[in-house]
Image (cartoon, helix red, strand yellow):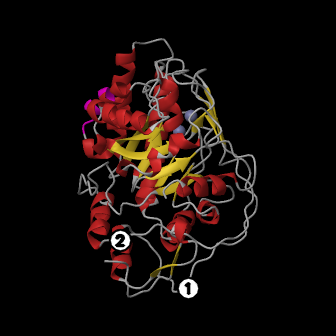
Amino acid sequence: MPCCDAIKIVGDSDLKKMVHTRKASCAVHKVIQNGTAKVSGVQTSTWTSRKRKAPSDQGSATSAEKEGEAMTVVGKQKKKTSTKVEIPLKKEMTEVKNEVAYVNGTSTATGNKFNGSPCSTGLRYLGAHISAAGGLENAITNAVSIGARSFALFLSSQRTWNRKPLEEETVEKFITAYKGAGYPPHLILPHGSYLLNLGSPDEATLSKSRDLLIDELKRCERLGITQYNVHPGSSCGKISREECMAKIAESINFAHRETKFVSVLLENMSKQGHTIGGDFAELKTIIDQIEDKTRIGVCLDTCHAFAAGYDLRTEEDWKKMIQVFDEAVGLSYLKAMHINDSKGDLGCHLDRHENIGKGKLKKQGFLPLMKMPHFADIPLVLETPCEGDDVYEREIKLLYSLEK
Ligand SMILES: [Zn+2]
Ligand SMILES: [Zn+2]
């Protein structure tokens, strides 16, 4: 059942743009609202994004894999002028109920038979890593302004252990903003701090990482966010990989016990240095040791997979990768993706993101992503180099153009 008459498709049908006029009477939105606490009143106006200040580089990231591992550069975001809002569409009441159950931690939920999403609209939700400079709620304005239907962000500075507490006012503004823009919680995917090493051989770093993870997960829960993505960790060459994976699993179990419902999504890595998780089987080894398997999943990064040796240049390659992933991990754990082209060749073990179509995957490498059913209903988040104002917006449009 569509959301009363509140969702209308306008213009630019190839992008399935929608304008959403929220109505207090809309049953679907009442259900969504009841899913998390402290959602402010329903608005009745059509939501349009406002001009925003150019964010600083808080939302961009230079990832230094903890303790001297490889580097990643996630795009810089710059100013973008206002555009009409494009929002994710929720089609079915049952899907919304699934999501509420998921948020409340009462369901292992899989509403989707092809992956671990709680929903099954069959639509693709492309987005990007968004700057939250100047206030978390700005991330939503920024996401809407580039036509993102899902987004990632850092919940606090990713380069410092000591962070300011999350103010209640910020929580309320953020929830109001994402509900207002129509983003369901499972399409918002905070990225873990780059300081985290949940499998660190160093006791002090391990302890600080565990505290930081708990703090981050508690922030997610206050914000009504259901998933949080981390790089699994690194042995730093000082302990065995098995020992490192056991520490990672214990870190997550520990954090699960301290929190209520948020899931941790392990990101596959490019096999750089001593990082864990380049091989899908390693992700499964960690998952096997997680006590609450309803709160664990995988965020699959296309650049990392390719660099780790999983070819993604043709449809056959993607089918094979999906089969290998399903056998090694299980598709029900696939809950998000990072969409990046790769500067490096297949199996290069380098974590070097490239703009869509400009790297070794080429544009046609992303065709299966936009056609296979396995990638619907989960966040598909760009982390490509973003030097210009509108890189993400153009890449989102480019990818949607491949759907046809
Ligand atoms: Zn990534
Ligand atoms: Zn990367």
- The range drawn in magenta is 285-291
Disc marking residue 91: 2
Q: Residue at x 47, y 65 (%)?
A: 183
| Identity, as a three-letter code, of the amino acid under mark 2 | Lys
| Identity, as a three-letter code, of the amino acid under mark 1 | Ser
In the drawing, does residue 242 fall left or right of residue 388? left
Q: Position of residue 106 (x, y in %)?
A: 23, 57
Q: Can residue 192 be seen in this view?
A: no
Task: Determine whether 33 is above or below 137 in the image.
Answer: below
Asked which secondary structure carries label 1, the reply is loop
Disc marking residue 45: 1
Task: Determine whether 339 is above or below 377 in the image.
Answer: above
Residue closer to the observer: 48 or 159: 48
Q: Where is residue 78 in the image (x, y as percent from the top left)?
A: 74, 54
Cα distance, mark 1 to mark 2?
21 Å
Q: Residues within 10 Å of mark 1 (few under 14, many from 20)?
A: few
